[in-house]
Amino acid sequence: MKNKIRSIVLAVSIAATLSAVPSAWGQTVMLSASVNCTLWPKFRNTPIARATVNAFMTALSISYWKFNTGKVGDHGLDPLAALSSPEEAYGWIDGYCAKNPGDSLALAMNSLFAELESRQRQTMK
């Protein structure tokens, strides 16, 4: 019950503090500016945290396809395919946030996506 209350409080605080954050491609995205890397370890294993990461990464992927190909679903490059599982993304964010506690979660996810893109480009050479 205590964890449910924490999750609800966190979800409400996220919803109440949404702000615009620049993405890796210069597009503006909406994510809570108050959710930073110092909070990540505290709520990493909650459904809301996982849903946030999954949704944000998927949205980055769709935007990436649209930006680079003009349409969604043209899989010339599919950076998320470089992940073996969602857990790999959460683990990568763990490491990023440990090194950059003052950064926003949005910046951590953008950095992960940029690394995945770079990894995939290297394998395509």
Image (cartoon, helix red, strand yellow):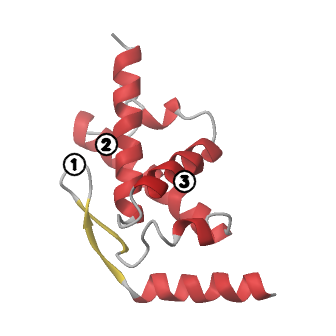
Q: Are marks 2 and 1 in contact (CB under 8 Å)?
A: yes
Image x and y of residue 17, in percent: 38, 85
Q: Closer to the observer: label 3 or label 1?
A: 3
Farthest top residue? 125
**In the picture, which quadrant includes the N terminus?**
bottom right
Image x and y of residue 78, in percent: 42, 32
Image x and y of residue 8, in percent: 63, 86
Task: Give SS at disc 2.
Answer: helix
Q: Residue at x 41, y 15 (%)?
A: 123
Farthest front residue? 99
Q: Which residue is mark 1?
A: 25
- In this rendered view, identify the residue nearer to me: 42 or 8: 42
Up/down of 79 relative to 17, above or below: above
Work out whether mark 2 precedes mark 1 in sequence or the reverse, and give the earlier one.
1
Q: Which residue is mark 3?
A: 94
Task: Give SS at disc 3.
Answer: helix
> Which residue type carries mark 3?
Asp
Q: Which residue is mark 2?
A: 64
Q: Are marks 3 and 1 in contact (CB under 8 Å)?
A: no
Up/down of 22 relative to 111, above or below: below
Categorize mark 2 by other alpha carbons within 10 Å: few (<14), some (14-19), many (20+).
Answer: many
Categorize mark 1 by other alpha carbons within 10 Å: few (<14), some (14-19), many (20+).
Answer: few
Categorize mark 3 by other alpha carbons within 10 Å: few (<14), some (14-19), many (20+).
Answer: some
Q: CA distance from mark 2 to mark 3?
A: 24 Å
- Regarding residue 36, the answer to whether it shows in the image is yes
